[in-house]
Image (cartoon, rainbow, N blue to C red):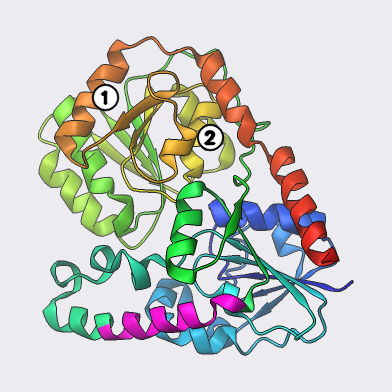
Amino acid sequence: MKVALVHDWLTGMRGGERVLEVLCERYPDAELFTLLHIRGSVTGVIEGRRIHTSPLQYLPNIRRYYRECLPLFPVLIEQFDLDRFDLVISSSHCVAKSVLTRSDAVHLCYCHTPMRYAWDQFGAYFGADRIGRVPSRIMRSIMARLARWDRATADRVDRYVTNSEHVAGRIRTYYNRDAIVIYPPVDTEFFYPDAVVPERYALVVSALVPYKRIDIAIDACRRARLPLKIVGTGPDRTRLERAAANRSGHAGNPVEFLGRVPDEQLRDLYRRAQLTLMTGEEDFGIAPVESQACGRPVIALARGGALETVIPDETGVLVDELTGAAFADAIAHALDRRFDPAAIRRHAERFGRQRFSESIGAVINETAAC
């Protein structure tokens, strides 16, 4: 059986790429199709595949503006020739699910989310307050067409698998399809506790994009007078740095933007943090589980995937309101509470890589046999 893997783009190791990495391990001879591959941005397991890319790959400095090419993605994803493949596995948060396959081929999609900007988070990305009134009006028309295309191509997939009950609900709403929930892989063998005394800071590990609401974390730590370290990159970094400079009026709560860091440094940051913050509504949220694997509590918005990964007052604190004041109160509550690192760690172990690999393998085999 010839297998093809399809992923939207390869520009860094985030949750979606961790799923793809396991798929590459399970299917070492599979060929990989992606709109854009920034060489060296993902692990050797992925880089070692035979990788096919779209014409985006040949545009100069494309890594700086590939997101602005979004209206072209539907045309580009449909250009891949997958007629040679009996089994197609797409890892999709944008357009990968919509590849064209042979009529008798099996297509299983691990859907990280229906595309946020086209469905329910337009304002966070393209609202008038972010890009201006006229550009926002233009983008609304483009995103409406993209949403119609996204729905029209949903039935190109034979079976959907997804990362949380939260996203399964969104798949039912937007695609009118059911999805099997298999929580994504967290490397709990690499992320584990150590006998270090926590230092006085909160940690955010996130792409710096609008819906993550990192501005709320900055405001909350200012109110709580707690230093904040932010790991990650993205188009919102300049805006967030300005926000941090404007809001950090106290020497006792500096905000550090660390960019991308090596995995060993990230693990050390988790271990030494007093807590990890997740202020956006996540589909699942890998970083909070990595933090818990290191025995450290999480403060998260009580929406989306956090409801499935954080146990209130046992592995962290869930916050009902998306405000700096509410998160500051939660920080104070967490700092006053004694969390058991061993109990936090045990909870995280249910999201391990081996469990994901076995579960996704069983579903793929069952789907291919139908």
Residue at (25, 58) in percent of width and height? 238
Tally of numbered tags: 2
Mark 1 element type: helix
Residue at (82, 84) in percent of width and height? 84
Q: Tell me the amino acid under the disc marked 1.
A: Ile
* Label 1 – label 2 distance at C-alpha: 19 Å
Is residue 253 at all visible to an observer of this figure? no
Please state if 127 lies on the left or on the right of 2 as rendered: left
Please state if 241 lies on the left or on the right of 315 as rendered: left
The boundaries of the magenta stretch are: 141-155
| Closer to the camera in the image, 146 or 177 | 177
Query: Which comes sooner in the sequence, label 1 or label 2?
Result: 2
How packed mark 1 is, by other alpha carbons closer than 10 Å (few <14, some 14-19, many 20 or more), is many
Q: Which residue is mark 2?
A: 290
- The quarter of the image holding the N terminus is bottom right
Helix, strand or loop for the magenta stretch, by majority: helix
Q: Is residue 308 above or below residue 87?
A: above
Residue at (23, 86) in percent of width and height? 138
Q: Which residue is mark 1?
A: 331
For the view shown, which residue lies furthest in the right direction? 1
Residue 324 coordinates in the image, percent (x, y): 17, 37
Quarter of the image for residue 27 reads bottom right
Please state if 345 lies on the left or on the right of 308 as rendered: right
Q: Is the residue under label 2 in contact with that under label 1 (CB below 8 Å)?
A: no
Is residue 145 a member of the stretch shown in magenta? Answer: yes
